[in-house]
Image (cartoon, helix red, strand yellow):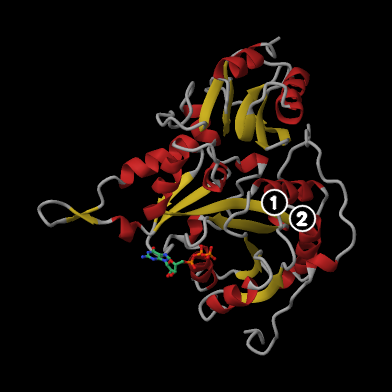
Amino acid sequence: MEDDDESPPLAVRIDELPEPIQLESSLCSDTSGGNKEEATVGVTVITGYLGAGKSTLINNIINGQHGKRIAVILNEFGEEIGVERAMINEGDGGALVEEWVELANGCVCCSVKHSLVQALEQLVQRKDRIDHILLETTGLADPAPLASVLWLDDQLESAVRLDSIITVVDAKNIRLQLQEYRNSASFPEAFLQIAFADVVILNKVDLFVVENKGGDLITDGLEDLQKEILSINSLASVLQAVRCQIDLHEILDRKAYGANHLAHLESLLEDSKTAPVSSRHDYSVRTLCIYEELPVDLNKVQLWLEDLLWEKKSHMDVYRCKGVLNVHDSNQLHTLQAVREIYEVVPARPWRETEQKMNKIVFIGRDLDETLLRNSLKSCIL
Ligand SMILES: Nc1nc2c(ncn2[C@@H]2O[C@H](COP(=O)(O)OP(=O)(O)OP(=O)(O)O)[C@@H](O)[C@H]2O)c(=O)[nH]1
């Protein structure tokens, strides 16, 4: 056992670290990606609306029986830090909280993102003492810039990698938030948080229990709610929970951004021409899927993605994108991933003999134009 009870928590003031560097760029690699995964410390980003259950989840993780030594980073505004920390039990159970990092004076997603990377690097210098990092973002944060920073940082050869984004959703209130959107011009962060999630924890399902006319307790409508969430982001795994009690294997070490572990790769290939769940709700944020079998020219695909994601020539707002490509003159199945403007195309493995070679791309975004996306992919065919 280590002397953790005696050790004071370590606080790294990331707002005092040196000047940020330019991080916006794309990744497009012809070498095998994801090989550094095993050597790096995974970062799980935990996001969700105010009061959804993020702290409850962190408590469960740091006290869970997974044997991992976990560092927790809290991204909350100034005065709230004390409250937040007081709510978290510092590891009485299986896992130990080795380090605490307070992110004061700003939101990770805007002013201090590079400093966050540096703080993470400081943490993992003691890598022999840390297995995993949890980063809780403020309830109102857009997780995209954070994902980009952590994902890019992997390319900068840091010792950390983005493992996954987990969004905690309050089952009782989320429908209200989503329905309000239909009647107003405002765009709730709740949509973004679901759109960027690799895992959605549909929490507080106990509060979803209602009494029917006969006096019985039922959870009528929960499945519909789950479908509604999947219609926004059909690539996410949705887990129903009470007090965020879930199998921790479902959320730690998902490697959602590793090219060779691309989540849903196999189901992408299996469900041939459609997205895993088709959209049936009338939200402007949705998932859609495009499909072509003939081989594409990789350069053309890159140019198309850059027009779409960087130049935004077609005025679509693409948040996430995952897919497989059948690249001309290559026997390798290529995987494609994008988070906002950052994308990566990587040869993942050889196509299997029994497999239908295909290009299949799933987009999650706002105001997606299906015809335009389809035609653009077609124009990349040789
Ligand atoms: N009934 C019920 N209450 C829950 C559940 N999960 C969490 N809560 C309660 O909901 C409240 C908010 O939970 P937190 O874990 O603090 O939520 P949070 O997302 O960290 O909140 P903020 O930091 O304010 O954004 C607390 O009072 C929890 O006890 C649940 O599954 N069912």
Q: Is the CB atom of the residue marked by disc 1 within 8 angstroms of ligand 1's nearest atom?
A: no
Say which amino acid is labelled 1: Leu
**Residue occupying the point 54% across, 67% down:** 58
- Across and down, in percent, residue 309 comes to 71, 30
**Residue occupying the point 61% across, 28% down:** 324
Q: Which quadrant is home to the C terminus? A: top right
Residue 234 is at least partly visible in this image: no
Task: Report whether 338 appears left or right of 228.
Answer: right
Q: Quarter of the picture for ligand 1?
A: bottom left
Q: CA distance from mark 2 to mark 1?
A: 7 Å
- Across and down, in percent, residue 253 comes to 59, 55
Q: Is the CB atom of the residue marked by disc 2 within 8 angstroms of ligand 1's nearest atom?
A: no
Task: Report whether 70 appears left or right of 270.
Answer: right
Pick whichever of labels 2 and 1 is earlier in the sequence: 2
Location of mark 2 (residue): 113
* Circles 2 and 1 in contact, beta carbons < 8 Å: yes
Relative to 165, say whether 248 is above or below: below
Q: Which quadrant is home to the N terminus? A: bottom right
Relative to 277, say whether 192 is above or below: below
Give the image quarter of residue 130. Answer: bottom right
**Residue occupying the point 74% across, 75% down:** 11
Residue 150 is at least partly visible in this image: yes
- How packed is label 1: few (under 14 Cα within 10 Å), some, or many (20 or more)? many
Say which amino acid is labelled 2: Lys
Q: Secondary structure at mark 2?
A: helix
- How packed is label 2: few (under 14 Cα within 10 Å), some, or many (20 or more)? many
* Count of all numbered marks drawn on residues in the image: 2
- Across and down, in percent, residue 30 comes to 78, 31
* Residue 146 disc label: 1
